[in-house]
Amino acid sequence: MTKNIVILISGGGSNMAAIVNAAASNDWAQRFGARVAAVISNKEEAQGLAFARERGIATAVVKHRDFASREDFDAALAAAIDSHRPALVVLAGFMRILTPGFVAHYAGRLLNIHPSLLPHFPGLNTHQRAIDAGHSVAGATVHEVTAELDHGPILARAEVPLLPGDTAQSLAARVLAQEHVIYPQAIETFLAGRKAD
Ligand code: GAR
């Protein structure tokens, strides 16, 4: 049976695009029996949706603002995701905190990328916080999602130098370029059914 991957985005979707491109160029269909089945956003203006549509990938929007509670939103989101029978759900710049029930439902098949070297700087504004802390390296982490925000077993990390004069924007761009490398790699590792090195 095909391993369907559902990707959740909130904005630019550059990680999603890197994953879609890797799936095609690295032949995930042949190697892993896997395909990106759908891209779902909580924001209808998310730019990544257009990219997915152009690639013939199913898209959906589940707006968090339409729901009174996190539980109601997560239930609607899970219904949209589960209509694609996912083997793997990939958070790619999905900027919502998920309820414990949602996380439990996808236990063992829910991945996230976070733009810091976890366990440093969970949460928001990671790049400015790395600069303010005077760190000399920054980076990104791919991890399995567990109930605690930005925790969970780590599948991959990438380090970049933090340079004198860096701003949050310049650092974010340097980190993002590495995210595009490690996220597809980590997903390949997951699909191959082995732990990262
Ligand atoms: C990425 O840097 C990702 O690590 C971060 O948002 C950006 C999304 O970019 N995610 C988080 O901060 C999650 N808490 P993209 O939409 O171009 O992939």
Image: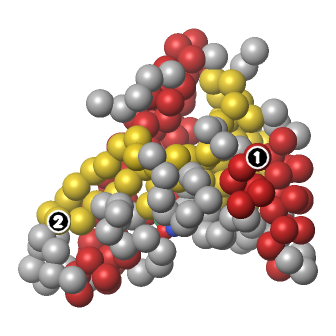
| Real-space Cα separation, disc 1 to disc 2, in angstroms | 35 Å
Compare marks 1 and 2 and give the one earlier in the sequence. Answer: 1
Residue at (31% x, 82% y) in the render: 129
- Furthest-bottom residue in view? 132
Residue 108 spot, x, y in % from top left? 61, 38
Between 83 and 71, the one nearer to me in the picture: 71
Badge 2 marks a residue whose secondary structure is: strand
Residue at (27% x, 72% y) in the render: 171
Visible residue check, residue 71: yes
Between 126 and 154, the one nearer to me in the picture: 154
Residue 58 spot, x, y in % from top left? 79, 43
- Kindly report which numbered mark, 1 or 2, lies closer to the viewer in this rendering: 1
**Quadrant, the C terminus:** top left
Reading the image, the residue beneath label 1 is: 105
Q: In the picture, residue 147 is in which quadrant?
A: bottom right
User: Label 1 crowding class (10 Å Cα cut-off): few <14, some 14-19, many 20+?
Assistant: few
Compared across the picture, whether 187 is left or right of 166 comes to right
| Amino acid of disc 1 | His
Residue at (81% x, 62% y) in the render: 74
Reading the image, the residue beneath label 2 is: 137
Compared across the picture, whether 171 is left or right of 87 comes to left
| Amino acid of disc 2 | Val
Residue 144 spot, x, y in % from top left? 52, 47
Visible residue check, residue 39: no
